[in-house]
Image: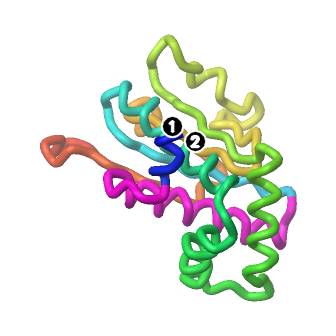
Amino acid sequence: NTAIRNAFTSQYISAFRESLLSFLVAGAIRRCTEFDYRCAQLFNISTIQDKHARYAKFCDDIIEALKTCDSVTWDALLVPIFQNYAVVNVNWADVSKRLKTDLDSGAVRTIVVDSNPNTASIASLLDPNTGQLALNTPYSIFIGGEAIGRGVTIDHLISFYYVRNNKNQDTSI
């Protein structure tokens, strides 16, 4: 699959890829010390809904490429990210093992959140006890635009990626 082969090399998504990989490493670090830990990443991409599905596909391609890459590529991509974190009592070998296990077990989920009738409604994604976006897997990646940029709460949000065209002067975080 060309998309998966390009997941690590495309300059078009380099910042997006770096953000996703950093989130996965950070989540694995936390899960090494607290196994039941669940975390979230939010990609607030655009108000254009067609882009949400495209970025969800980018996520899925990067995750699939990680699952199948060789150990040299794995370390080249992820060790520098791990070294950027000030980690105490967790080593790279444990983090690497935890992340590989989590990826292989389907612990990472990409969810498109928008007002498109062809995707899940926001109400169906909420935890009924808290009213927050539910973290149904250890790593939940939410992708959307306006629907998630206005009044949505996400527990254990450890990574946020926000992109807008510079013509949109009225956007805010």
Residue 162 to residue 132: above or below: below
Q: Please report contact status of discs 2 and 1: CB closer than 8 Å, yes or no.
A: yes
Q: Dominant secondary structure of the magenta stretch?
A: helix
The residue closer to the viewer here, 153 or 62, is: 62
Q: Secondary structure at mark 2?
A: helix
Query: Residue at image x 63%, y 68%?
Result: 74
- Give the residue number, with chain letter if any, for mark 1: 56
How far across and down, in percent of the image, does residue 23 sit? 58, 61
Q: Residue at x 84, y 66 (%)?
A: 34
Q: Quadrant of the N terminus?
A: top right
Between disc 2 and disc 1, the foreground one is: 2
Mark 2 Cα within 10 Å, few/some/many (few <14, many 20+)?
some
Q: Is residue 79 above or below residue 45?
A: below
The type of residue carrying mark 1 is Ala
- Apparent side of residue 36 relative to residue 134 in the rendered image (left or right): right
Task: Residue type at mark 2: give it.
Answer: Asp
Examine the rendered structure and indicate whether residue 30 appears above or below residue 2.
Answer: below
Image quadrant assignment for residue 47: top left
Q: Where does label 2 land, which residue?
A: 60
Left or right of 152 in this view: 168: left
- The front one of 78 and 132 is 78
Residue at 73 percent across and 80 percent down: it is 92
At mark 1, the secondary structure is: helix
Estimate the x, y position of residue 71 in percent, counting from the top left: 69, 70
Residue 163, compared with residue 71, is above or below; it is above
* Residue occupying the far left of the picture: 167
The structure's colour scheme is rainbow
Q: Residue furthest right?
A: 35
Q: Which residues are magenta?
A: 8-35
In this rendering, position of residue 129 left or right of residue 159: right
Viewer-side residue, 61 vs 110: 61
